[in-house]
Image: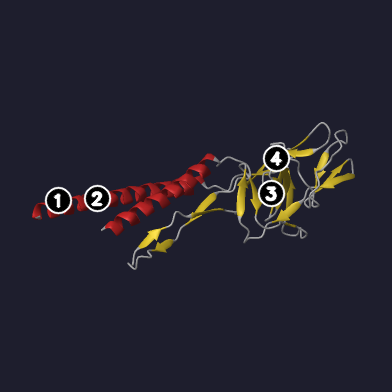
Amino acid sequence: MESSLYVSLSGQIALERRLETIARNMANVSTAGYRADEVSFEAILSRTGDPVAFASTGETFIERRSGAMTQTGNPLDVAVRGEGWFAIQTPAGIAYTRDGRMRMLPTGELQTLAGHPVLDVGNAPIQLDPDGGAISIASDGMITQAGEQRGAIGLFSIDPAAGLKRYDSSAVIPDRPAAPVLDFAENGVAQGFVEGSNVDPVRELTKLIIMSRAFEATASAVAETEGALKDTVKTLGTSV
């Protein structure tokens, strides 16, 4: 009986973790380049010898599927086509993002809207000519002004097996080195577009309903177990 109580409580903790990720995803449904949080769960067998399985608190991971692209017409809005990531310099080191909303400072430095320098394939900041005229960005990231090459936006691939740590809202820091993208047949960039969040709000709301009902069910199971324990104590007390 006590095992069922602990199993129900472990289930509530796991569901609470899942509800937190749903809330975080819904809060970022309109965040450019945001990648949704997901949680994987598993059962943990009791080590007491009893065939009891407890729910783990879950392991959070970042879902990498692409978000929808929206055309903006802004020449400094760039979206990734394929599986690549932009590299940016942050106080925490080099991070990678799919948020391609950029700006040029009056001194010519290319930065994200958050103020992080955008890097080229050699991890060097990109310097443009503030008086060089219109900016054109090719599918391979090459930047030209008035027909002259000014640099190239670096595009990087992250190992599918790499663990990702979130930086700010849309950037990630992998636990394995990212590699420059060299094949632009299936990968590249699209100027004048922005990639949105990959959160599916309908899917998240559906999961929220399922999680809420599951939480209520486990809460009911806890209450029933506690009631049964109280009845057992009363019965044992009156029989003494």
- Separation of disc 3 and disc 1 at Cα? 61 Å
Q: Secondary structure at mark 1?
A: helix
Dot 2: few (<14), some (14–19), or many (≥20) neighbours within 10 Å?
Answer: some
Between the residue at mark 1 and the residue at mark 2, the CA separation in whole angstroms equals 12 Å
Instruction: Name the one closer to the observer, 13 or 122.
Output: 13
Check disc 3 and report the residue beneath it.
96
The first of marks 2 and 4 along the sequence is 4
Residue that numbered label 4 is attached to: 101
Name the amino acid type tagged 1.
Answer: Lys
Q: Earlier in the sequence, mark 3 or mark 1?
A: 3
Q: Amino acid at mark 3?
A: Tyr
Eye-nearest disc, 3 or 2: 2
Whole-number angstrom distance, CA of label 2 to CA of label 4: 54 Å
Asked whether disc 3 touches disc 2, contact meaning CB atoms under 8 Å apart, the reply is no
- Return the disc, 1 or 2, that comes first in the chain's sequence: 2
What amino acid is found at the position of numbered circle 4 in the picture?
A: Arg
If you read the primary sequence from the N terminus, does the residue marked by circle 3 or circle 2 appear first?
A: 3
The image shows residue 86 at horizontal and vertical percentages of 72, 48
